[in-house]
Image (cartoon, rainbow, N blue to C red):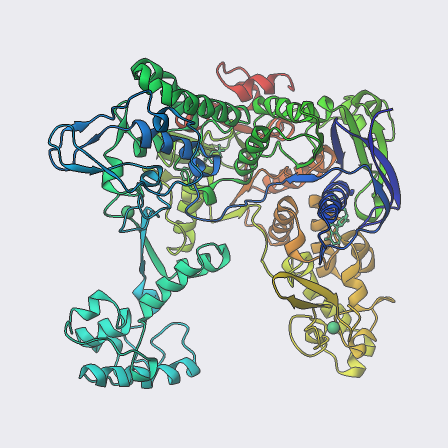
Amino acid sequence: MTAQITIRGARLHNLKNISLSIPKNQLVVLTGVSGSGKSTLGLDILFKEGQRQYLESFGLITYGVSKPPVDAITGLSPTISVDQHLTNHSPRSTVGTATEVYTYLRVLYARLGHRPCPTCGKDISPSFDSSDAEWAGEAGVDEDDSAPEGTFPCPQCGAPIPELGMAHFSFNKPDGACPTCTGLGVVHHANLKRLIDETRSIRDGAVLGWDDFQTDFHIPVLQTGAAYYGFAFDPAQPVREFNPPLRDYFLYGVESPIFRRHFPGIEPPPTVRQGRFEGIATNLLRRYAEHIQDPDYREKVEELLIIQECPDCHGTRLRPESRAVTVNGANIVELSRRSLGEIDDWLAGLPAVFTPDEMLIASSILADLKERIARLVEVGAGYLTLDRSSPTLSAGEAQRLRLAALLGSGLSGLLYVFDEPTIGLHQRDTRRMIDVMRRLRDLGNTVLVIEHDLETIAAADYVIDFGPGAGKNGGQVVAAGTPAEVAACPESLTGQYLAGRISIPVPPRRRQPNGRAITIRGARQHNLQNITVRLPLGLLIAVTGVSGSGKSSLVFDVLDRALRQRFYGAGGDAPGEHDSIDGCEYLDKVVTIDQEPIGRIPRSNAATYSDTFSAIRAAFAAEPEARRLGLTARHFSFNVPGGRCERCEGAGVLTVKMHFLPDVEVRCPACHGRRFTRETLSVRYRGRDISEALEMTVEEALALFQNVPAARSRLQVLADVGLGYLQLGQPATTLSGGEAQRVKLAKELGRRGTGRTLYLLDEPTTGLHLADIARLLGVLQRLVDSGNTVLVVEHNLELVKTADWVIDLGPEGGAAGGRLIAEGTPEQVAQTSGSYTGRYLKELL
Ligand code: ADP
Ligand code: ADP
Ligand code: ZN
Ligand code: ZN
C-alpha cells in the first residue's frame, strides 16, 4: 500500500467535517469552484499543521499557531508553501542577488577579472601559478567574503595594488558600493515643496505633519539654536523669508555639511535643550533609511521624496574601481543588464578565451552557474535581467524564482503546497511548469497544487475536487482519483469540464469594430520595441503573450498612466515611454481593476468596500426598535464610536502584544466578538442583528435584504462576479488577490456606467474555476454591451477565445519580446504564424 497523508474530521471555515487521504510522493491537484475550500485544506490546514508538527518535533513550542479544528492528521511531512506572496521587499535585492547568479559572477570577477593599474593605467592581468593552492582550490562562494587586505606590486610600474575580493563587486558591501548612493543606485532628496508650505510660518503650520504639540515643542528648540549660532528666528516669519543660515539649519540640521559651511568654526550644540535640531529634510531621509524593509512605511514616505538616478554611478550601484574590472571585455555592470538567458550564452563563450590555468579556476564556478541558470530558464524566468530589482517582480515571477531555488535544493521527503503556479504563465510555459513539479515529485516529495488550469489537472497523478458549490454550499470532496476517474464522475463539475462535456462556448458572432479606436504610438517602456498598437473601442479586447513579453508594460505602465494623467491630472506615476496616444476623446473614464489588496487594515471588508454596508445600516436604522432607542445608521457602524463595543473599538478581537513573538488575537471579552453594544444588537432586521448580518455570506444577505433595493443591487453584483460565498464581514486583509480584484470589479459595476469607460483588468481569471470564469464573462460582456470597452491582460484561453479582438505581443519574454505579433479577431490571430497564442487558440476554435 502506498504511503498516505490522512485527514479525519476537518471542520475549518466551510469544510464539512471531511475525511480524506492524499497519496504521498505524487503530484496531487486540489481543485473546485472558487470558495469551495481548496485553500482551506491545502494552506490553512496541511501547510500550517505540517509546519507546526515539524517545529514541535524539535521540541519547539509554537506560540500563536493553534491546532486547526481537525480530529487527526497523520503521515504529514515537513511542509513548504510556494505561494504568490513576494518575500523580498528590500530595494537591495535584485534578481541577481536573489538567485545567487550575481554572487557567483562576483567570484569570477574577483579571481579572473582584468583591471587597469590605478597608477600607470596599463592592464594588470591576473597571473597565477596553477600549483598555488589558494587559487586552484575550492572555487565555490566564500563563506567570508570580506575584502582581502593585502597588496601586490603592479607588474608594469611596480606600484602597490590592493588585491581584489568578492566584496569589491557587491553593492551591498561598503567595499563595492558606490559611496554616493551606498549601492542603491538612486539618491533621495526631500520634496521640499510637499513637505513645507513656504508661504506660512512655523507657527502657522508650515511643516506638513506637525501638530500643535510638535510645533510647540520645536519652536523653543529652534529659538535656542538660533541664539547659539547668533542669528534670529521668528516663529511667525514665513519660511520663504528665512535667511540662508536659518533655512539650512531648519531644513538640514546642525550636523549637515550644508549648514556647517556657514559656521565652520563652531561645534554643533550637543543636546536638544541647547538647540540641537536634526533638520526637517534630514529627519525624513533618516526615517526612510531606517524603514527600508517596511514597504508600507516606504510607500508613505516616498510621496515626500524625490528619487533620482545616482549621479556618480548612474544607477549601476558600484564603485568606479569595481566597474573598471572586466572579464572577456565586459564589466560586471554590463553583465547585470543582461537577462539570465543572455548570461548563459556569454558564459558558454568563456572557455574559448580563458587560458588553461584560468579554466582550472573557472570551471567549477562556470558549472555551478550553468546549472543554476538552467533551472531558472526551466521555470520560465530566463528573460529576467540580473539587475531587476526584486520588489518590482510580479507575483508569478517571484514564485518562479522560489521554485527554481527549491529545485536546486535537491531536498526530498517534503510536502510542497503550490498556490496556482500557472498564474502569469502562457499555455506554452504551463507544460514546462508541470515538468518542474514532476521533477520535485521524482526527488521523493509530495507535490500538492491548488489549481484551476485543465492541463495541469489532467497531468496530475491524483485529483481532489471540492464542492459542490462555494462557501456554505461547498466544503466537501465531490470526487477524488486519477484525472480519468474524476472525468468519469457525473457529480464533479471539474470532471465535466475535464471530459469536455461542458465548456465555455465560442461566441457565434464577434462584435464589429465601430471605427473608433485608441492608438498608442511609439511605445518603448521596458522591452517594448517602439510599437504602435490600435485598440478598437466598444469591444472586449484581450492582450496576450508569453510572460515578460510586455503586456503589463503596455497596458498598465503606458496606457493606464497616460489616460489617468489626462483624465485626472498630474499626481500619479509618470506614464511609461511612448510618443503619443490618439483617440482619448472617445473616452471619459478609465477604471483599473488590479489584484492589489484592498486596504491593509482589517476593518475594511467586502461590505464596507462595495458600499453595501451603508445600505444595510440604513435598513437597521429604519426599524421601529432603532427609532425608539434613538439609534441612527451611524450607530450600526463598527468604525466610529456610538453603537460599537468600545473595548475592542468594533473589531471583535483584541490584539495582545507578545514580546519577541507574533501578536496574538483574542476574542473581545466585553462583546464576545460581536463588535457592537447590547443596545445596538437588540435591534433586529427580519430577525437578525447587525453582527449576524456581517456573518452572512453574500448569497444569504441577498435573500435577507431583497426588499432593500440599494443593498440588493450591490449584493447582486458581488454574487455575479462569483463572490456569493464570501462572508460580508471577512476582513479585507484575508482576501486573496483574485477575490480582492472581484470585490473591486463589483464596486465598479455597482456604479452607473458612462458607456464611454475603458476598463483595464489584470488576469481576472486568477483564482477562478472554469465555472466561475463562465459567470465572470457574462459580467464583462454586459459591460461591453452597454458601450464600454473592456481590456483584459490574460493567459486563460477560455477567456481569450471569447474576446472580440486580440492583441498578441512577443514572440518571447524580455529583450526577445516587446513586438506586436498579431492583432485581430481570435480567428485571425489563430491564422498568424509565429504567434504562440494563435497556435494554442486554433485548437479551441
Ligand atoms: P478556495 O480555495 O476553494 O477558493 P477557500 O478555502 O479560500 O476556498 O474558502 C472556503 C470558504 O472559507 C469560503 O467560504 C471562504 O469565504 C471561507 N474562508 C476563507 N478564509 C477564511 C478566513 N480567514 N476566515 C473565515 N472564512 C474564511
Ligand atoms: P508581461 O506583462 O507580458 O509579463 P512585462 O510588461 O511585465 O511583461 O515585462 C516586459 C519586460 O519588462 C520584461 O523583460 C520584464 O522583466 C521587464 N520589466 C517589467 N517591469 C519592470 C521594471 N519595473 N523594471 C525593469 N524591467 C521591468
Ligand atoms: Zn551611486
Ligand atoms: Zn468588543
Residue 378: quarter of image = top right
Residue for point 70% across, 77% down? 646
Residue 166 visible, this angle: yes
Residue for point 30% across, 65% down? 192
Q: Is residue 404 toward the left or the right of residue 225 in the image? A: right
The quarter of the rendered structure image containing the N terminus is: top right
Indicate the position of residue 114 as horizontal and vertical percent values.
24, 28
Q: Of residues 116 and 495, which is closer to you in this image?
A: 116
Vertical arrangement, residue 524 with respect to residue 317, above or below: above
Picture quadrant of ligand 4: bottom right
Q: Of residues 259 and 706, which is closer to you in this image?
A: 259
Q: Is residue 489 toward the left or the right of residue 351 in the image? A: right
Indicate the position of residue 707 as horizontal and vertical percent values.
80, 61
Indicate the position of residue 824 as horizontal and vertical percent values.
50, 24
Vertical arrangement, residue 345 with respect to residue 153, above or below: above
Residue 458: quarter of image = top right
Residue 505 visible, this angle: no
Q: Of residues 311 and 317, which is closer to you in this image?
A: 317
Q: Count all numbered tags in the image, as a single digit.
A: 0
